[in-house]
Image (tube, coloured by chain):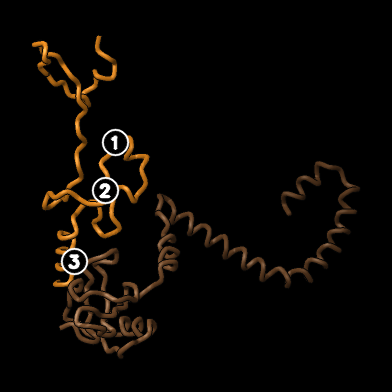
Chain colours: A brown, B orange
């Protein structure tokens, strides 16, 4: 059973309950394994074989083993540092959180439209400021009460 | 009078007969309990016996072994779990 390419589960040690592949046979009692466990020499008595096999050459590198696991068994082998960074991402859902996100999205969309329209509006604004200068000069001559009304209507 | 520390229940009261013929109370300390496997009730190895206070102050390596189900199951019972996982 314990031949080249056989998928096993390790029973003993600190990496127990993890799957591995047999890469090479060293002795009557020892075997070389790789996979979710470390790449090391292991006793045959500490392995429990499964019904799966992989296409792996003798003395295969770690990258070839990772590819074989993904193609045949759909198991991804991730390094420890990357796994911790992925696990730290999930965010807790709160009440009203969806509404807040929706409002933020709308505000972001409005900002984008304003930014796009601003360079086109600059040419128009320059003309308006010239006109506004004339109007301001005319307003200063009039009393304040009428000016307040005019500002509201405008 | 009795010393203050002997009034606690961690000390056991033992009645002894001294050569003069009297019976006298002596105080002896109780032994702490030992950690055991949850399934087969054997004593676990690599773990020290401690009171609740020293357990809080101790480090991880004194309270468990570096193995899945370390500090809870013995090595033989943990291997049976791995076999069941492989046979599914």
Mark 2, mark 3: which one is toward the viewer?
2
Q: What residue would you read off at disc 1?
A: B52
**Mark 2 and mark 1 residues within 8 Å of each other at the beta carbon:** no
The residue under label 2 is: B47
Q: Is residue A105 left or right of residue B3?
A: right
Question: Can you tell which of label 1 and label 3 is closer to the viewer?
Answer: 1
Disc 1 from disc 3: Cα separation: 32 Å
Circle 1 sits in a helix, a strand or a loop, which is it?
Answer: helix
Return the x and y of residue B45 as percentages of the image width and height: 22, 52
Mark 2 on the same chain as mark 1: yes
Task: Say which label, 2 or 1, has the lower sequence index.
Answer: 2
Of the pair A62 and A148, the residue shown nearer to us: A62
Label 2: element kind: loop
Q: Secondary structure at mark 3?
A: helix
Labelled disc at residue B82: 3
Q: Nearer the viewer, residue A30 or A88?
A: A30
Q: Quadrant of the C terminus of chain B?
A: bottom left
């Amino acid at each position: 059973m314990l031949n080249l390419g056989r998928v096993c589960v390790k029973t003993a040690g600190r990496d127990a309950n993890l799957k591995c592949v047999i890469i090479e046979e060293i002795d009557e009692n020892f075997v070389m394994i790789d996979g979710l466990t470390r790449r090391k020499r292991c006793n045959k008595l500490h392995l429990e074989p499964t019904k799966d096999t992989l296409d792996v050459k003798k003395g295969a590198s770690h990258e070839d083993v990772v590819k074989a696991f993904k193609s045949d068994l759909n198991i991804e082998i991730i390094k420890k540092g990357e796994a911790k960074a992925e696990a730290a991402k999930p965010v807790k859902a709160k009440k009203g959180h969806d509404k807040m996100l929706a409002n933020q999205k709308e505000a972001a969309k409005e900002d984008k439209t304003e930014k796009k329209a601003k360079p086109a509006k600059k040419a128009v604004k320059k003309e308006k400021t010239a006109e506004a200068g004339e109007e301001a000069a005319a307003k200063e001559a009039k009393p304040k009460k009428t000016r307040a009304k005019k500002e509201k209507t405008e | 009078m009795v010393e203050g520390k002997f009034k606690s229940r961690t000390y056991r009261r033992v009645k002894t007969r001294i050569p003069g013929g009297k019976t006298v109370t002596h105080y002896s300390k109780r032994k702490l309990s030992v950690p055991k496997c949850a399934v087969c009730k054997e004593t676990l190895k690599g773990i020290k016996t401690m009171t609740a206070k020293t357990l809080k102050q101790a480090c991880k390596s004194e309270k468990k072994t570096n193995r899945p189900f370390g500090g809870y199951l013995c090595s033989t019972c943990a291997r049976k779990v791995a076999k069941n996982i492989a046979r599914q």
